[in-house]
Image (spheres, coloured by chain):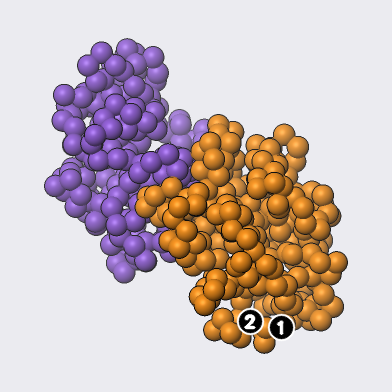
Chain colours: A orange, B purple
Amino acid sequence: MIELWELRGQNDRRYSNFSWRTRMALRHKGLSVSVQPVLLTDKASIDFSGGKTVPVIRDGARVVRDSWQIAEYLEKQYPEQPSLFGGDTGKSLCQFVNTWVDRSVVPIAFQALAGDAILVQDPTDQPHFRATVEKFTGKSPEALKEAQGKTFERLLASVDPARALLKRQAFLGGDAPCYADYSLFSVFQWARIVSPLPLLPAGDALAAWFGRVLDLHDGHARDTPAFY
Amino acid sequence: MIELWELRGQNDRRYSNFSWRTRMALRHKGLSVSVQPVLLTDKASIDFSGGKTVPVIRDGARVVRDSWQIAEYLEKQYPEQPSLFGGDTGKSLCQFVNTWVDRSVVPIAFQALAGDAILVQDPTDQPHFRATVEKFTGKSPEALKEAQGKTFERLLASVDPARALLKRQAFLGGDAPCYADYSLFSVFQWARIVSPLPLLPAGDALAAWFGRVLDLHDGHARDTPAFY
């Protein structure tokens, strides 16, 4: 049984996009997981990891932090289970997609979602989150919320290369999902968990793909507190 | 012997970024190639392909057009030669990178390079190219050239996810190049062939990677008329 530390908000919302990458990777590998929810401001609970961010996993005596490091660990430690990467080239290109998500998509998503996200966070975490939002964007969550329509448009434009590919195939990984799917999925799952305003228009190839990923692993990602 | 049709400019400049993807794929597969240069406005020479764009290859009785289709063809037809994709997942993710280059990088590169590119084209092609530039950008090549400094900055920012990865590894494909490397390489090769102003600053992780790709296959891509 692998233990996973991840963030929780009000009403048990598990909103961390990075933790969703790890959750899906663990499920992809068919591993049993025990989840330990923590607050954003509760650094003491994850002190043992040597870091200040989730996700963190503990697998027996082994502690691994950072969602990408965890994916690498799982692939190496459980080679007989379904592959996350599909080989060396696939691993390298999954890391490219993961980096593309982190650098070209997540920063826009953060601006698009911060105004909603603060409302589902635990009251204990809200002042810290507000300060983080203002530090990184120069704006208040409320000001970002007012601009949300336009920021959603930018976010949907930023994922255009994925949309073009997903018009032609079921997953970024081809006929079957790979870790790159989970990297991108995590952004839309984050949106679904924190924001009442649906992000993906019906008919968008990404909406159909998102539904397919929600259905994976017995609907694991669908079955979590969310707005839609 | 495979025949390849590709564009030529003045002084034998082979400036088509899409054809460079095909050139590198053919070399990666260790195949012998006979190159047939054509002008942009000479559609009659490639009528046999059923399309109006290069690259086109003819391999015996088989004609294939479109650089991605050609890569798929080569991988399937020559499975015993070094793989371009590294398996099914790698193929799918190479297509993602190829699409990302086409949609997030090439449009900016086109604006960044058009003002120089027209000067190396054959005089026969220049009026057609000018009309294409004005249609797609709403600006003249000369106006785009005036804004080149800022457009270069945007271009260098657009490839940030690749830069982050290439700080940690030799190629997008990992220790060895894959088709995704050739997709991205083709943009910087295009710049090198048409623009006297070096695009990649010394010290940029992409500059070191670009040098490594130029060195591949006995320096095949280095050995072509270019500005630097």
- Mark 1 — on which chain does it sit? A
Q: Report in which chain the residue with disc 2 lies.
A: A
Tell me the amino acid under the disc marked 1.
Asp
Q: CA distance from mark 1 to mark 2?
A: 8 Å
Helix or strand or loop: what does disc 2 sit on? Answer: helix
| Res A128 visible | yes
Q: Image point 43% across, 61% down: which residue? A: A76
- The residue depicted at 29 percent of the width and 47 percent of the height is B189
Question: Is residue A13 positioned above or below A38 on the image?
Answer: above
Give residue B119's position: percent from left, percent from top.
30, 40
* Helix, strand or loop status at disc 1: loop
Answer whether labels 1 and 2 touch (C-beta < 8 Å): yes
Q: Residue at x 67, y 83 (%)?
A: A45
As drawn, A206 above or below A28: above
Q: Nearer the viewer, residue A95 or A1?
A: A1
Circle 2 is placed at which residue position?
A46
- Residue B111 in sight: no
**Residue at label 1?**
A42
- Relative to the observer, which residue lies in front, A225 or A154? A225
Q: Position of residue B83 (x, y in %)?
A: 29, 40
Amino acid under disc 2: Ile
Mark 2 packing: few (<14 Cα in 10 Å), some, or many (20+)? some
Q: Left or right? Give the position of B162 relative to A208.
A: left
- Residue A105 placed where, x, y %? 60, 56
**Depth check, front residue: B86 or B99:** B86
Q: Quadrant of residue B80?
A: top left
Which residue does the image show at 66% across and 56% down from the upper left? A187
